[in-house]
Amino acid sequence: MNFAVLASGNGSNLQAIINAAKKGRVRGKLKLVISDKADARALERARKAGVPKVLFVDPKGFPSREDYDDELVSLLRKEKVGLVVLAGFMRILSPVFVRAFRHKVINVHPALLPAFKGAHAVKDSLAYGVRVTGVTVHFVDEQVDHGAVIAQGAVEVKPKDTVETLSKRIHKMEHVLYPKVVDNFLRGKYKISGRIVKAK
Ligand code: GRF
């Protein structure tokens, strides 16, 4: 199965997926990487890894969110992708996109959803004083950080943790969990019914 990664930033999760694919642990073809940021390190990583298509698609070139998402949908369809992996893609996808790829878009979030949704999950978790946080991989639906949960991993919060130290351990967990989920999806392992995802 072909798949694509959408990323806005550093792209360490993209790198983890690329590395796993090189070792034969992600069994699919990464055809396309798209970023909404011209200077995303993720784009560099993708080019270096030899991903066939690596694109910066500038949101400024589109009159509305739906127009932008339409463009993404057509780029993804052209490459016949069966899975869209969000890896730090910092845009909310419109229903246009979600409907086009229903149950085919996954995201990784740095907290145990439904706790600490949003763009500052690690900071918010620390401020709340939780002792355990973690990583959630989930399907993307019309609401932010809301779709059915595919996998979670727990990370302990240490008394001296800062956003930086905790983020580092959360990233480590992401880099293990996310490539595994991508591989399982590509091999048709997930069955989804409502909010419940079962591994076949
Ligand atoms: C990750 O922490 C992920 O949970 C969140 O965005 C971050 C992306 O990091 N959605 P990177 O760009 O993959 O390094």
Image: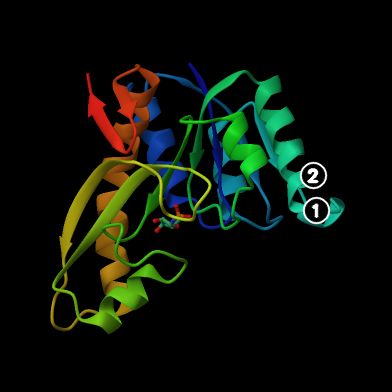
Mark number, residue 139: none
Instruction: Look at the numbered discs 1 and 2 and tell me whether their residues touch, using CB distance below 8 Å.
Output: yes
- Seen at 23% across and 25% down, the residue is 199
**SS at badge 2:** helix
Residue 148 in the image: above or below residue 155 = above
Circle 2 Cα neighbour tier, 10 Å, few/some/many (<14 / 14–19 / ≥20): some
Q: Quadrant of the C terminus?
A: top left
- Image point (20%, 81%), residue name: 129
Q: Position of residue 178 (x, y in %)?
A: 33, 41
| Quadrant hosting ligand 1 | bottom left
Q: Which residue is tagged 2?
A: 67
* Cα–Cα gap, marks 1 and 2: 5 Å
Q: Which residue is mark 1?
A: 64
Report x, y in % for residue 53: 67, 30
Q: Position of residue 103 (x, y in %)?
A: 46, 31
- Quadrant of residue 18 within the rendered picture: top left
